[in-house]
Image: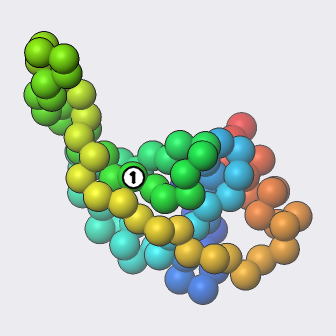
Amino acid sequence: MRWSNWTTGGAQIGAVHGRPVAVHADWLSRLEAGYRNECSPENPLLRIICEAASPTVIYGTVHAKPAIVGSVVPVQVEASPAVLQAIVEEISD
């Protein structure tokens, strides 16, 4: 997931899996160090991930993996598909 410097209507535009996504720029600016967003191709929600690994018990063994601490619903962007695609291509290079 990458974020561009482009904003519209208070939403910052980014790209995930080759498609545009947007969240409120004020919220994104408050995301603290050690946390990041990620998204799966089949789910429109963005997950907030704590990059510090936390222990997880899986089938009787302990594995350390990043923890999902929340989720964010992307906002609808009022922009032409061509402009959004150009932004995605720009930040995907």
Whether residue 71 is visible: yes
Residue 69, percent from left and from top? 24, 52
Nearest the eye: 9 or 42: 42
Q: Residue 5 sits in which quadrant? A: bottom right
Crowding at mark 1 (Cα within 10 Å: few <14, some 14-19, many 20+): some
Measured along the vertical axis of the image, is residue 45 above or below residue 68? below
Measured along the vertical axis of the image, is residue 77 above or below residue 2? below
| Outermost front residue | 59
Residue 81, percent from left and from top? 84, 67
In the picture, measured across the screen, residue 30 lies left or right of residue 22, that is left
Can you identify the residue that label 1 sits on?
Answer: 47
Q: Residue 63 sits in which quadrant? A: top left
Q: Identify the residue at horizontal 29%, vertical 58% (top origin).
A: 70
Nearest the eye: 67 or 15: 67
Measured along the vertical axis of the image, is residue 62 above or below residue 4? above
Residue 17, percent from left and from top? 65, 42
In the picture, measured across the screen, residue 92 lies left or right of residue 36, that is right
Amino acid type, callout 1:
Arg
Nearest the eye: 5 or 81: 81
Measured along the vertical axis of the image, is residue 13 above or below residue 50? below
Residue 55, percent from left and from top? 11, 28
